[in-house]
Image: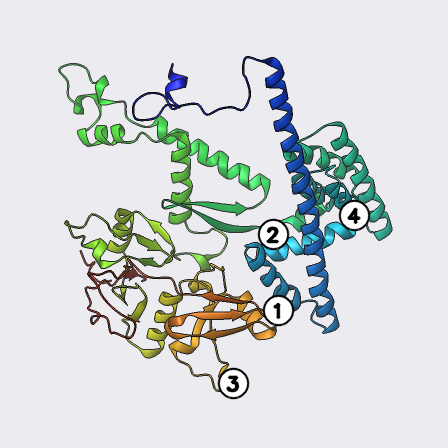
């Protein structure tokens, strides 16, 4: 009964079951429908494999094209042409430039080192996910003699494809089997591979929405498991140390008589976090409140983020239920109460004056011209202005749209923020950019395609209606300080609430 109710509508009565396309009471009809569905799945899998094989060859051709130009011009180390075409491919397949460049390089290596896997993909003998895992693992097979390395990698592919034919292993299980085979065939010790792999350690953040993100730390397996084990032990100790619930207080006695103050008992009642939740909080506390032990130069450094809070959000109108969200780094909405807490402890504010209709940034309050210009551009651009790039402006470099050496003015209408990679792409490849009014950038690729990037709006935006009859060419009402300037805490002033 409970199982059925879960699928019923919230209104009256159960949701009608659509025609399944077969007779459930007829075994022949059931078998025929099952065969039809599996045939559809098989055909779809074959089409996906063929498409993946075609894209693999296209990616490899793109990488080889760019690499050939780099070699011809003597810039193979900087890979300018590889970066350039990877950016254009990224726009076509809707991937970040760095991700696209990685896919291009992997495709080239796959066709060069593991051609049999490309053929297996085309014939649907292996799925795209299986091929990816086999390439990833097969590249661990190294040898000082190039010919011997090629031979061993070929042997690895034969062994693993035979395993795939015998047993339809999913990618994770296939990788486990492949790791064992690769370990037997490689001429490089685990210590050598570990030292090389350590060079790739890094930290990244993935925003999930709803004010939550994933913090990823790529480090050695020993340290990762040790960190998790310590956090788990500390979290268990915190949970174990929670005072007993107030309901256990003997009749006629007070919380104080049982060793618990009322305040402590209230805290215990409120702390109902799970072990996973406590572990997450413990790791955050350790990272944010502890100083590094390796170098004293890094002690005392605190995190800095850009937080935009529309003034209409801080002082909401009770007659209007909607509130524009606070924005972390200008892009990720976060709970307003958390934003208020951060703003209350911010050492200073930068006031952003925005257009009351479009939300476009108009000006930034600051003291010196240079600081004002930089503050304006960081607040306007929010992130790198290359199409689809979201590298925060705080990590970007200012670029003259019209080069300064060719008469470009150092003015906000001729400046924009680019991450280092796209700054280099603009100056050293055939990509071009034109800046229009309001900071809108029009990009032209080396193949002649055009893409437009608009600055992110700050705060709420409104669409003119009959009640707001503005026409092209007419002037909007004069911007006022209260219409609606977000406050961006950056570095003490009294909080505005």
Residue 213 picture location, percent across and down: 42, 46
Q: First in sequence, mark 4 or 2: give its number.
A: 4
Residue 181 picture location, percent across and down: 76, 35
Q: First in sequence, mark 3 or 4: give its number.
A: 4
User: Looking at the image, do the residues carrying marks 2 and 1 touch, with CB atoms under 8 Å apart?
Assistant: no
Residue 134 picture location, percent across and down: 71, 41
- On residue 200, which mark appears? 2
Q: Label 4: few (<14), some or many (≥20) within 10 Å? A: few
* Viewer-nearest of discs 4 and 2: 4
Residue in view at x 74 percent, y 69 percent: 71
Residue 479 found in image quarter: bottom left
Q: Is 47 positioned to the left or the right of 388 in the image?
A: right
Quadrant of the rendering where the C terminus is positioned: bottom left
* Residue 189 seen: no
Q: Is 310 positioned to the left or the right of 104 in the image?
A: left
* Viewer-nearest of discs 4 and 1: 1
Give me the C-alpha separation between circle 3 and circle 1: 26 Å
Give me the C-alpha separation between circle 3 and circle 2: 38 Å
Secondary structure of the residue carrying tag 3 is helix
Secondary structure of the residue carrying tag 4 is helix
Between 292 and 348, the residue placed more toward the observer is: 348
Give me the C-alpha separation between circle 3 and circle 4: 48 Å
**What residue is pinned by disc 1?**
447
**What residue is pinned by disc 4?**
115
* Viewer-nearest of discs 3 and 1: 1
Q: First in sequence, mark 3 or 1: give its number.
A: 3
Q: First in sequence, mark 3 or 2: give its number.
A: 2
- On residue 405, which mark appears? 3
Depicted 487 relative to depicted 50: above or below: below
Residue furthest to the left in view is 252
Give me the C-alpha separation between circle 2 and circle 1: 34 Å
Q: First in sequence, mark 4 or 1: give its number.
A: 4
């Amino acid at each position: 009964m409970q199982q059925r109710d879960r699928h019923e509508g919230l209104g009256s009565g159960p949701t009608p079951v659509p025609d399944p396309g077969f007779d459930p009471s007829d075994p022949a009809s059931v078998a025929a429908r099952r065969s039809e569905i599996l045939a559809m799945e098989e055909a779809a899998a074959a089409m996906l494999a063929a498409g993946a094989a075609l894209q693999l060859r296209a990616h490899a051709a793109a990488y080889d094209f760019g690499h050939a130009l780099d070699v011809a011009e003597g810039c193979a180390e900087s890979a300018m042409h590889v970066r350039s075409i990877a950016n254009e491919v990224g726009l076509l397949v809707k991937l970040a430039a760095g991700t696209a460049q990685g896919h291009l390089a992997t495709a080239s290596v796959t066709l060069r080192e593991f051609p049999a896997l490309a053929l297996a993909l085309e014939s649907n003998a292996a799925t795209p996910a299986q091929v990816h895992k086999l390439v990833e693992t097969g590249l661990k097979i190294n040898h000082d003699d190039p010919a011997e390395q090629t031979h061993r990698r070929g042997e690895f592919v034969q062994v693993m494809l035979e395993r795939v034919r015998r047993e339809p292993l999913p990618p994770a299980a296939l990788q486990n089997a492949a790791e064992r085979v690769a370990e037997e065939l490689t001429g490089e010790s685990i210590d050598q591979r570990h030292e090389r792999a350590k060079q790739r350690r890094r930290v990244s953040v993935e925003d999930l929405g709803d004010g939550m993100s994933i913090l990823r730390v790529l480090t050695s397996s020993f340290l990762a498991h040790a960190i998790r084990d310590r956090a788990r032990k500390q979290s268990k100790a915190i949970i174990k140390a929670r005072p007993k619930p107030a309901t256990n207080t003997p009749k006629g006695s007070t919380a104080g008589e049982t060793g618990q103050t009322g305040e402590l008992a209230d805290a215990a009642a409120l702390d109902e976090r799970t072990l996973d939740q406590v572990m997450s909080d413990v790791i955050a506390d350790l990272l944010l409140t502890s100083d590094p032990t390796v170098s004293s130069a890094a002690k005392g450094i605190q995190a800095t983020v850009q937080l935009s809070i529309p003034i209409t959000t801080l002082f909401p109108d009770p007659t209007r239920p909607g509130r524009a969200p606070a924005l972390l780094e200008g892009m990720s909405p976060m709970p307003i109460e958390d934003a208020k807490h951060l703003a209350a402890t911010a050492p200073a504010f930068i006031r952003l004056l925005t257009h009351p209709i479009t939300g476009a940034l108009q000006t930034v309050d600051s003291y010196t011209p240079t600081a004002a210009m930089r503050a304006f551009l960081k607040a306007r651009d929010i992130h790198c202005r290359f199409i689809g790039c979201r590298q925060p402006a705080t990590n970007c470099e200012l670029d003259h749209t019209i080069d300064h050496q060719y008469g470009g003015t150092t003015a906000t209408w001729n400046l924009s923020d680019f991450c280092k990679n796209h700054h280099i792409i603009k100056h050293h490849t055939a990509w071009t950019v034109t800046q229009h009014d309001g900071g809108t950038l029009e990009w032209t690729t080396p193949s002649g395609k055009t893409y437009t990037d608009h600055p992110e709006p700050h705060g709420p935006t409104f669409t003119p209606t009959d009640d707001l009859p503005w026409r092209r060419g007419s002037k909007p009402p004069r911007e006022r300080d209260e219409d609606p300037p977000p406050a961006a805490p950056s570095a003490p002033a009294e909080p505005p609430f």
